[in-house]
Amino acid sequence: MTQFEFISVFASIIMGLGLAHLLTGAIQQVYRRQIDYVQACYAVLALLIIVLNWWGLFAWKDAPAWSLIQFLVLTLWSLAMFVICVAVYPPGDLGKEGFETHRRVVLFAITVALVLDIVQTAIHGALFQPATYLLVVSHFVVLAVAAATIRNTLAQKIIATYFPMAVFVWGFVWTAGAMGGAQ
């Protein structure tokens, strides 16, 4: 087993657990008929973040040697994505306030995951592959921080709608550019 295989299995387990938690939470919300629009948008965003980053993990396959720093950053990066999923659908009942009481935790977790994505991309030496990577991901960080501070319900819905749509579009740009269109 190569070092990449060892590390990617570990990260894949963490991301897989996050997806399992996310899907379980979504199914429970549908079953209870307690669907919150903003929460559903952030659930879709969490799904996209994990799927795109899981695919992006493959970019590390040719790394010749691994350092403890690389391993720790990839571990924290994977854990941050798991935390996003748990924050979107936290254990227990959300109570009368619903998702709004946990929205900032979700946005903080998204911000941490994005910053760790920038760090792991820099360590990998691909910070400008594609050239717009840093600009786009930094824009997502600013958006998450802004969303955490804005209280207006309409603005929250607009941001929550924009975020997964923008990440979805970015995923196509990124996979075509950084991964060379690999299928």
Image (spheres, helix red, strand yellow):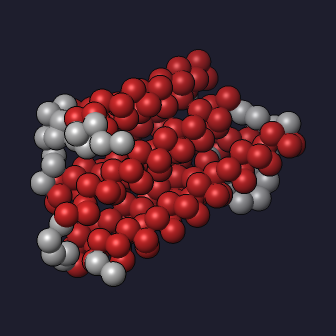
Residue drawn at the location 22% of the way across and 35% of the way down:
177
User: Which quadrant does the C terminus fall into?
Assistant: top left
Depth check, front residue: 106 or 180:
180
Q: In this picture, is 48 found above or below 87?
A: above
Residue 110, position as x, y percentages in the image: 44, 47
As drawn, the residue found furthest toward the bottom would be 1
Residue 19, position as x, y percentages in the image: 59, 54
Residue 83, position as x, y percentages in the image: 52, 58
User: Which quadrant does the N terminus fall into?
Assistant: bottom left
Depth check, front residue: 36 or 166:
166
Residue drawn at the location 25% of the way across and 49% of the way down:
118
- Residue 124 occupies which quadrant of the picture? bottom left
Residue 71, position as x, y percentages in the image: 28, 73
- Residue 97 occupies which quadrant of the picture? top right
Residue drawn at the location 22% of the way across and 39% of the way down:
180
Residue 171 in the figure: left or right of residue 81: left
Res. 121 visible in picture: yes
